[in-house]
Amino acid sequence: MKKLASIITMFLLFVLTTVLAQQPPVTRSFRLDEHSVVKDSTGKIYSFTAWSKLMATRQYTIQPENFEAAVPIFIIMKRSQAEQHQVAMIKQMSAKGAGAIQSQARTKEPAKFIPPGENSIVKDSSNIIYPYAAWQNMMSTGNYTMRVAFAGPDSGIYTIIKRSPQEKDAMAARMAKPEPSDRFKIGDDFGSFKAKDINGEKLDLKAMTGKVLVVNFWFIGCPPCRAEIPDLNEIADHYKDNKDVVFIAVCLDEAFDIKEYTKLHPFNYHIVDGGRFIAEKYGVRLYPTNVVVDKDRKVVFSSVSNQFTNPYWIKKTVDAALAAPITTTAAK
């Protein structure tokens, strides 16, 4: 009996060893994105922009340095001349529609790009997944861009990324300047008014001759007015140490409602409450309306609605107005 048991045990071990030997090796997938550590064979670490540009040339390839590491480090290597030639041939043949290419191995047909839609998975760099309505709203602001996830162009997985201020400015510079408001034509005398902001600070525009004014007309119940506040705050913060630039927001609502709203949504302008009489004085009917007034109290920029290019042109106009001298006539 002992001999039979020993034979059975050896047989079972043989079967188990055979089955395990036939199992495919366990593979791991790695995420390669703007947060990945990528270096070359000398240990030099490349920024996301740098290694992306290298990869775009098709002369380089990337692979994990250590497959066992919990957080892999990637090595970027230049392809050999033979490999580069093969890649170039594949690209050339694909462009001609020749289909698959025969070489030592058959290459796969390039995956078809699938535009993002309701069924797409859209996430940020921290893997938070956004519902369709949320990422659509984010993309509509122009403040975000979307990239295909590393899984491939046909995966239906995308990463949403916030544009940097420099990226937004570069994009806006290539677009048309907003049309001016018919209530604030370029070169018009802006005039003046006196008011107090919700903190009790007195504002006298006539006494502000020689300063550059950035004026916003808005009200709480206006969705595009609310949407542009973060961008306007960035502009105000940019000039916060410059006493020659004054930011004024004329709001139609009362002080109590404004203070309640700005507890959760700060607005870094001097906010004038109950501003309907000021808006009516200027004939403002469309909101939001933004105006830049130079040192001579002349309108040098105006726009209606929350336009993607507004922040760029407001800053550009403010900088130009600051650099320009005040005229003798206006100084009087």
Image (cartoon, helix red, strand yellow):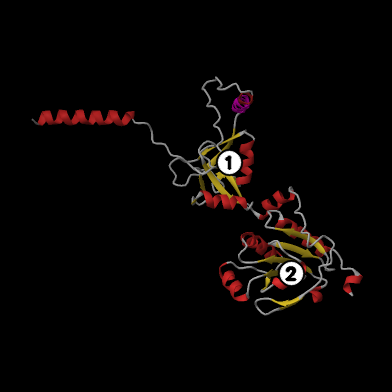
Residue that carries the numbered disc 2 in the rendered image: 280
* Cα separation between marks 1 and 2: 64 Å
Give the residue drawn at x 60%, y 28%. Answer: 87
Q: Nearer the viewer, residue 178 or 222?
A: 222
Q: Is residue 246 visible?
A: no
Task: Give the amino acid at mark 2.
Answer: Glu
| Residue 165 image offset from top left, x and y in percent | 67, 55
| Residue 199 image offset from top left, x and y in percent | 65, 78
Q: Nearer the viewer, residue 166 or 198?
A: 198
Q: Is residue 106 above or below residue 112?
A: above
Q: Main secondary structure of the magenta part?
A: helix
Residue that carries the numbered disc 1 in the rendered image: 40
Residue farthest to the right, as pictured: 328
Compare marks 1 and 2 and give the one earlier in the sequence: 1
Give the residue drawn at x 61%, y 60%. Answer: 223
Q: Is residue 285 above or below residue 254?
A: above
The magenta segment is 81-91
| Residue 12 image offset from top left, x and y in percent | 21, 30
